[in-house]
Image: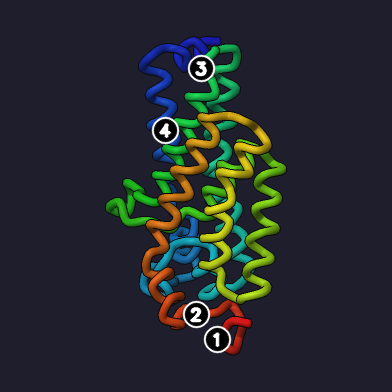
Amino acid sequence: MEMVSLANSDLGRYGLVLLSYLIGSIPFGLVLGKMKGVDVRRAGSKNIGATNVTRQLGKGLGILTLLGDAGKGVLPMLAVAALLRGRGDVDLWVVFSGGAAFLGHLYPLYLGFKGGKGVATALGVFFYLNPLAALIDVLIFVGVVYNWGFVSLGSLTAALMMPGLIWLLTGSLPYTGLASAIGILIWFKHHENIGRLKRGEEKSWRKNGSGK
């Protein structure tokens, strides 16, 4: 009860948002890579996310990175929702928490604010906002990657579609606003990929290195 009372104080609510950012800053891909003696920031695309970890260290560690990055998006939101249950503005604080966790992955305190592209962490946030919307978005991502072979194109398409899905399935302005902000930041963080896609230089997930 004392923890709940503290969380509901002004200082406590802001503290929860800050804690969400710090949790979001945990670089699971980097940590798992270091355990294998590989700094993923110096290999492949030099990204700390699941795609680069999979390419450099295999599917097992790639899946663990995906789960860790998604988990650090959804778990802070679940915790905030539980601690602030019953408040009229609980959804707003949950949105702040999810946004902070997402920003933590993009701009992690522990890595000099140089982080990943946020797709897996966004997935965790979206699963909290609406599991059905997140599932549909995952299917969109898989369909795009299967047809064209580019993970970045799948991520960009999924990020573009998510705000509309959230609005259609929840009708929540705060949730839709968060999904929109996340989508914009994902596109911003993929600016190099967008350039390579335009030039036909983006690396395909397929072994032959070209899209379908």
Which amino acid lies under the numbered mark 2 shown in the image of this protein? Lys
Q: Quadrant of the N terminus?
A: top right
Place of residue 136 in the rendered image (x, y in percent of width and height, measured from the top left): 70, 51
**Which disc number belongs to residue 203?**
2
Q: What is the tally of numbered marks visible in this picture?
A: 4
**Which disc number belongs to residue 19?**
4
Mark 4 lies on a secondary structure that is: helix
Mark 3 lies on a secondary structure that is: loop
Colouring rule applied to residues: rainbow
Q: Sequence order check: which comes first, mark 2 or mark 4?
A: 4
Relative to residue 70, is residue 145 depicted above or below? Answer: below
Q: Residue visible at 54% across and 67% down?
A: 153
Q: Residue visible at 38% across and 73% down?
A: 195
Q: Answer whether labels 3 and 4 touch (C-beta < 8 Å).
A: no
Q: Which residue is mark 3?
A: 89
Q: Which quadrant would residue 100 be assigned to in this image?
A: top left
Mark 2 lies on a secondary structure that is: loop
Place of residue 208 in the rendered image (x, y in percent of width and height, measured from the top left): 59, 89
Which amino acid lies under the numbered mark 4 shown in the image of this protein? Leu
| Marks 4 and 1, how far apart at CA | 41 Å
Q: Residue visible at 63% across and 61% down?
A: 141
Q: Answer whether labels 2 and 4 touch (C-beta < 8 Å).
A: no
In front of the other: label 4 or label 1? 1
Relative to residue 53, is residue 28 depicted above or below? Answer: above
Residue 39 visible in the shown view? no
| Marks 3 and 4, how far apart at CA | 19 Å
**Which disc number belongs to residue 101?**
none
In front of the other: label 2 or label 4? 2
